[in-house]
Image: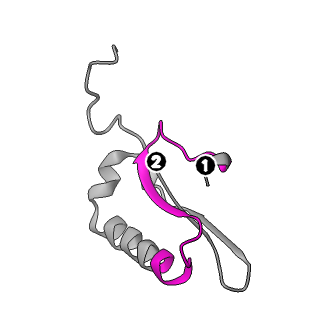
Amino acid sequence: MSGNEIKSSNEIKVHSEIEYTRADGQSVHSDLCPRNCNHDGLLHEEYKAHIHAALDEWLSKSNGSGYFYIASHHYHISHSQK
């Protein structure tokens, strides 16, 4: 497949994570990928609710530390970017 061809949605892989430091100094990290990291999993209502809850957690508890992201499997935050 050339770089210009669009993959079908069941071939697109995604990665999602949450990471932050709590007020007590404890580190929190969770991988939040949909089943098999499949893009189609992003469309399931249960997954949407799970991701929204994780975002609410990050907004409420992170004090701006760490990150919350959903991205193509090819994009990954390295430790040097955190």
User: Disc 1 to disc 2, how far (Cα)?
Assistant: 25 Å
Which of the numbered marks, if any, corresponds to residue 36?
2
Outermost residue on the top side: it is 2
Locate the C terminus and report the quarter of the image it occupies: bottom right
Closest to the observer, 1 or 57 = 57
Q: In which quarter of the image is residue 30?
A: bottom right
For the rendered model, the colour scheme is one colour
- Could you tell me residue 69's position as x and y percent? 45, 57
In magenta segment, residue 60: yes
In the depicted structure, whether residue 75 falls above or below residue 25: above
In the rendering, at what x and y percent does residue 38 appear? 39, 46
First of labels 1, 2 by sequence position: 2
The stretch drawn in magenta includes residue 81: no
Instruction: Identify the residue at the far right of this view.
Output: 25
For badge 2, the amino acid type reads Asn
Q: Is mark 1 on a helix, strand or loop?
A: helix
> Label 1: how many residues lie within 10 Å, few (<14), some (14-19) or many (20+)?
few
Q: What stretch is highlighted in magenta?
A: 57-79
